[in-house]
Image (cartoon, coloured by chain):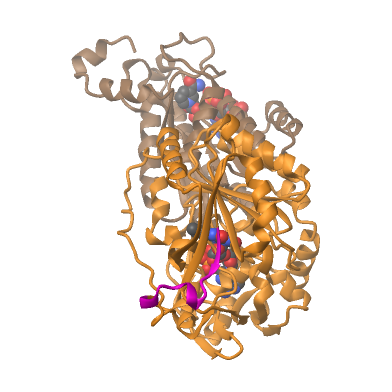
Chain colours: A orange, B brown
């Protein structure tokens, strides 16, 4: 049994609502089983790299299993593009190892610093969701450690697999999985950039031409008001084929480089993020984007993970932390999206570039977030007065439109509202009651939302 | 669990008929609070307070709790925590006493000290331990500006609050890093039944204003909150006024 730390404060990436838990870092299956069985009255929850914004990977008074100790890549089939690895392996590590072999992770979020376990636990999506679906679509099999200490090998057709994909660690601890990869010829991206003058223009462009791109996302300026409400910069692209590289780069086309800037100190002065400074930043950034540019070569890091260049950037929000609000509404609910965007713009939340994306087909995970439609994500300082009530109002709009908020980002939704957003929640609860009546797997999120 | 803005889902009020306590409960019920425990001496007023919160949609329980009976605290309070996590404990009981009378009646003065200080020490320690086991929660203690510097006109009450304030700060330090948040609230004159009939002082405020400051303090995870906020400056000036002058100030 690996040693546990004394109770230590833990938060998510948004640094709100800290709670204390014993941290345990299993390095083998046996240690993971022992840790779960020794979890105690307040249970355990798996934690990857803590990139979920809210309280999903916290467990007040109980145990938090730091899964980054299970970090072995077991086998790589470089012909078929299949990797078997433990759940604590990060996507960053997978990129380092797989790119030189001509393979890329099937789905990457806006940061490489997430674990495979976290990617399945939240059933994450990337800029390719409209074509490639969520992460779980590319998982061929996984090993799940359940409440009774048993390790079960699950296939995508199993109910327990479907409860686990997006199940936020509440069905058990994912120990390893087999992933189908995506082939690439180079480690560069070819990127098209264009500007959209307002929200309708943006939606029209995404609807008309998204299918031409593997990856697509729009950065939207939520502080712009009036006729410019929802103005945005679209960046869409694909992995560059070999012939797109300049001759000198064709010799080492699969080199993976990810530069780092100095990280944000732990006592970053708060108060720099005012409406005025954020507005100025958004303005500048919109103006500097080209009206239309095609075929620009960008690195993987620049295209997918611009924020990873600044370690600990979450500290710029100061001690009070921040929340990310992300929701999706279905196609046909564009009016709800317009209303929400107008309300955010009208209120003037000091929100840096928010992200709008068109989702494709859903995957079968019971609590998996994506569904066909529009998703918007924005960061807001948590200390903003009245923010709690304002987001509750947005929830009402989203729920009324049949939409939902994303649990991996959530730190504040009301339990009674969530029920309407996730129709499979009763099934999820039933399965949990059967498989884990004692609450061996418990998190602050599950306590808050009664999952 | 508290949400990202520090809003609790469950609340235990010690001093369940306190006007400040109930104003705070109403405000929090309007946000996230669904379960409320009102602890106090059984009375029609306590039942009425529970009924009032039920009307707002909360699930309300009452329990018998007497600050002066420290020996009974552990059994009474442990029962509450045994039924589920408590996200916030609001310590709101207290008595003002009657300075003039109490100076001539030591036993009455002791009662002020025992309610406000001894009773609070016992209840806070028990709640703090339970919160620590949970690994989360806020303990919010109603101190008073009166404890900041004892005044001729109410030093019995003032000294009890000074003790409570010092105790709570120390407890906050002891619990630092335990996941438990301890917050001292220092209101000035608040218009409640406690101050009924007493001459108002400048910066007098309402229970609702105290409730709002508590909600803000929870959001910011503050350690000390003054109500109104201007009192922080006023009191830091008053703290340095020399004794001979302070004695004669009409505060
Ligand atoms: C800058 C940034 C950009 C992001 N962009 C996106 C995006 O584009 N798309 C998107 O979908 N998400 C995005 N996210 C969110 C992030 O991808 C998810 O929260 C992801 O789950 C984080 O993985 P993690 O390893 O850090 O897991 P943690 O945050 O530690 O945990 C997240 C959840 O997964 C569970 N979990 C972790 N490991 C295991 C395991 N081994 N077994 C079972 N359950 C486990 C935890 O219990 C918890 O419920 C972003 C986050 C950041 C900070
Ligand atoms: N009002 C102000 O100006 C002011 C200013 C600063 C600080 N405060 C502090 O704020 C707190 C709340 O005050 P308030 O204005 O809301 O006054 P309040 O309405 O008079 O409330 C006082 C509470 O204390 C309870 N109480 C008294 N003795 C008790 C005992 N032995 N056991 C259990 N409960 C007991 C009372 O219960 P019963 O119903 O049983 O009597 C009542 O619930 C107090 O600590 C007070 O000192 C008040």
Q: Is residue A233 visible?
A: yes
Can you give x and y, in whole percent of width and height, for residue A81 in the image?
A: 59, 85
Vertical position of residue B29 compared to residue A402: above or below: above
Vertical position of residue B77 compared to residue A43: above or below: above
Asked whether A434 or A280 is in front, the reply is A280
The quadrant of the picture showing ligand 1 is: bottom right
Task: Give the magenta range.
Answer: A236-248
In the image, is A121 to the left or to the right of B112? right
Vertical position of residue A73 compared to residue B23: above or below: below
Can you give x and y, in whole percent of width and height, for residue A407 in the image?
A: 63, 56
Which residue appears at 36% of the width and 45% of the height?
Answer: B170
Which residue appears at 39% of the width and 57% of the height?
Answer: A312
Which residue appears at 67% of the width and 84% of the height?
Answer: A150
The C terminus of chain B: image quadrant = top left
Q: Is residue B39 visible?
A: no
Asked whether A332 or A210 is in front, the reply is A210
Asked whether A254 or A345 is in front, the reply is A254
Can you give x and y, in whole percent of width and height, for residue A368 in the image?
A: 70, 63
Give residue A276's quadrant in the image: top left
Asked whether A196 or B54 is in front, the reply is A196
Can you give x and y, in whole percent of width and height, for residue A434 in the image?
A: 78, 71
Which residue appears at 55% of the width and 23% of the height?
Answer: B207
Give residue B112's quadrant in the image: top left
Verify whether residue B42 appears in magenta: no
In the image, is A389 to the left or to the right of B132? right
């Amino acid at each position: 049994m690996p040693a546990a730390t004394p109770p230590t404060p833990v938060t998510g990436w948004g640094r709100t609502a800290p709670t204390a838990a014993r941290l345990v870092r299993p390095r083998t299956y046996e240690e993971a089983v022992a840790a779960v069985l020794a979890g105690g009255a307040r249970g355990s929850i798996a934690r990857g790299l803590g990139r979920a914004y809210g309280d999903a990977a916290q467990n007040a008074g109980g145990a938090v299993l730091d899964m980054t100790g299970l970090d072995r890549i077991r086998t790589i089939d470089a012909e078929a593009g299949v990797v078997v690895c433990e759940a604590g392996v990060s996507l960053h590590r997978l990129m380092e190892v797989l790119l030189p072999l001509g393979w890329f992770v099937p789905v990457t979020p806006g940061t490489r610093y997430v674990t495979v376990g976290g990617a399945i636990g939240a059933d994450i999506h990337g800029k390719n969701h409209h074509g490639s679906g969520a992460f779980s679509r590319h998982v061929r099999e996984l090993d799940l450690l359940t409440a009774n200490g048993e390790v079960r090998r699950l296939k995508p057709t199993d109910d327990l697999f479907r409860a686990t994909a997006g199940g936020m660690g509440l069905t058990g601890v994912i120990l390893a999985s087999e992933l189908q990869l995506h082939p690439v010829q180079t480690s560069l991206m070819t990127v098209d950039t264009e500007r959209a003058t307002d929200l309708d223009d943006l939606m029209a462009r995404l609807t008309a031409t998204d299918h031409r791109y593997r990856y697509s996302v729009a950065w939207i300026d939520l502080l712009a008001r009036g006729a410019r409400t929802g103005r945005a910069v679209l960046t869409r692209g694909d992995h560059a084929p070999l012939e797109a590289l300049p001759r000198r780069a064709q010799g080492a086309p699969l080199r993976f480089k990810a530069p780092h800037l100095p990280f944000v100190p732990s006592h970053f002065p708060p108060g720099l993020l005012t409406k005025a400074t954020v507005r100025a930043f958004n303005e500048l950034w919109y103006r500097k984007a080209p009206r239309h540019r095609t075929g620009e070569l960008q690195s993987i890091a620049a295209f997918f993970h611009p924020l990873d260049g600044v370690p600990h950037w979450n500290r710029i929000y100061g001690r009070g932390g921040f929340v990310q609000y992300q929701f999706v509404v279905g196609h046909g609910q564009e009016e709800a999206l317009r209303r929400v965007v107008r309300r955010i713009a009208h209120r003037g939340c000091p929100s840096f570039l928010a992200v709008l994306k068109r989702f494709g087909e859903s995957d079968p995970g019971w609590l998996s977030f994506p569904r066909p439609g529009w998703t918007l994500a924005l960061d807001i300082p948590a200390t903003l007065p009245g923010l709690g009530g304002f987001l509750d109002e947005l929830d009402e709009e989203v729920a009324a439109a049949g939409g939902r908020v994303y649990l991996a980002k959530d730190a504040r939704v009301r339990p009674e509202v969530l029920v309407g957003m996730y129709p499979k929640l009763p099934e999820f609860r039933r399965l949990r009651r059967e498989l884990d009546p004692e609450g061996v797997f418990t998190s602050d999120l599950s306590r808050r939302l009664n999952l | 669990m508290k949400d990202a803005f520090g809003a609790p889902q469950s609340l235990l009020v010690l001093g369940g008929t306190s006007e400040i306590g109930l104003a705070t409960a109403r405000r929090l019920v309007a946000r996230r609070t669904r379960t409320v425990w009102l602890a106090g001496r059984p009375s029609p007023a306590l039942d009425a307070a529970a009924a009032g919160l039920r009307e707002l949609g909360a699930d309300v329980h009452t329990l018998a709790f007497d600050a002066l009976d420290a020996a009974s605290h552990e059994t009474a309070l442990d029962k509450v925590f045994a039924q589920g996590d408590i996200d916030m404990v609001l310590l709101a009981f207290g008595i003002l006493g009657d300075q003039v009378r109490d100076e001539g009646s030591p036993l009455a003065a002791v009662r002020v000290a025992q309610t406000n200080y001894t009773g609070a020490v016992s209840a806070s320690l028990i709640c703090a331990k339970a919160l620590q086991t949970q690994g989360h929660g806020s303990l919010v203690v109603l101190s008073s500006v009166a404890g900041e510097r004892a005044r001729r006109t109410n030093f019995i009450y003032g000294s009890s609050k000074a003790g409570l304030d010092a105790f709570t700060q120390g407890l906050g330090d002891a619990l630092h890093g335990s996941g438990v948040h301890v917050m001292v609230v220092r209101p000035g004159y608040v218009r409640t039944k406690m101050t009924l009939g007493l001459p108002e002082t400048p910066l007098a405020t309402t229970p609702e204003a105290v409730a709002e400051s508590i909600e803000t303090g929870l959001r910011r995870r503050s350690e000390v909150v003054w109500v109104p906020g201007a009192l922080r400056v006023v009191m830091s000036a008053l703290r340095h006024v020399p004794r001979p002058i302070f004695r004669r100030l009409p505060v």
